[in-house]
Image (cartoon, rainbow, N blue to C red):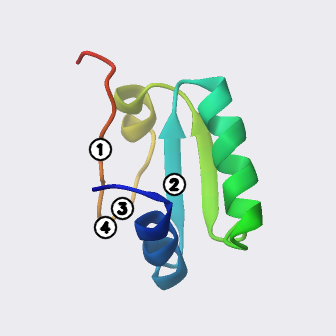
Amino acid sequence: MWNWWNYCRICKKSKKVISIDKNPEAIELTSKNIKKHEIFNKVELIEDDGVSALKSIDNMDIAIVGGSGGI
């Protein structure tokens, strides 16, 4: 199950995390949560659909993709 506890655990162990969502309300909530959990210096937020955003990222080790966009 994917939840904030798992997300924070991954973020704290990573050098950089890119979080992508096309929903502006989700981006706002994620922004508040990364500040609350003090991981804002490691997370880059991108407001876009996952396919487009992933094409623009040159170097990544792991991609965790989820959601219900009907793709």
Residue 46, x across and y down, in percent? 59, 39
Distance from disc 1 to disc 4, alpha carbons, whole Å, reads 13 Å
Amino acid type, label 2: Ile
Residues at marks 4 and 3 touching, judged by CB atoms closer than 8 Å = yes
Distance from disc 2 to disc 3, alpha carbons, whole Å, reads 9 Å
Rendered residue at 36%/61% (across/down): 60
Amino acid type, label 3: Met
Q: Looking at the image, is 55 positioned above or below residue 14?
A: above
Rendered residue at 29%/44% (across/down): 65
Residue for badge 2? 18
Q: Which element is circle 1 on?
A: loop
Q: Quadrant of residue 61?
A: bottom left
| Neighbour tally class for label 3: few under 14, some 14-19, many 20 plus, Cα within 10 Å | few
| Neighbour tally class for label 1: few under 14, some 14-19, many 20 plus, Cα within 10 Å | few
Lateral position of residue 66 relative to residue 37, left or right: left
Q: Which element is circle 4 on?
A: loop
**Which tag, 3 or 1, sits closer to the chain's start?**
3
Residue for badge 1? 65
Distance from disc 3 to disc 1, alpha carbons, whole Å, reads 13 Å
Rendered residue at 72%/71% (across/down): 41
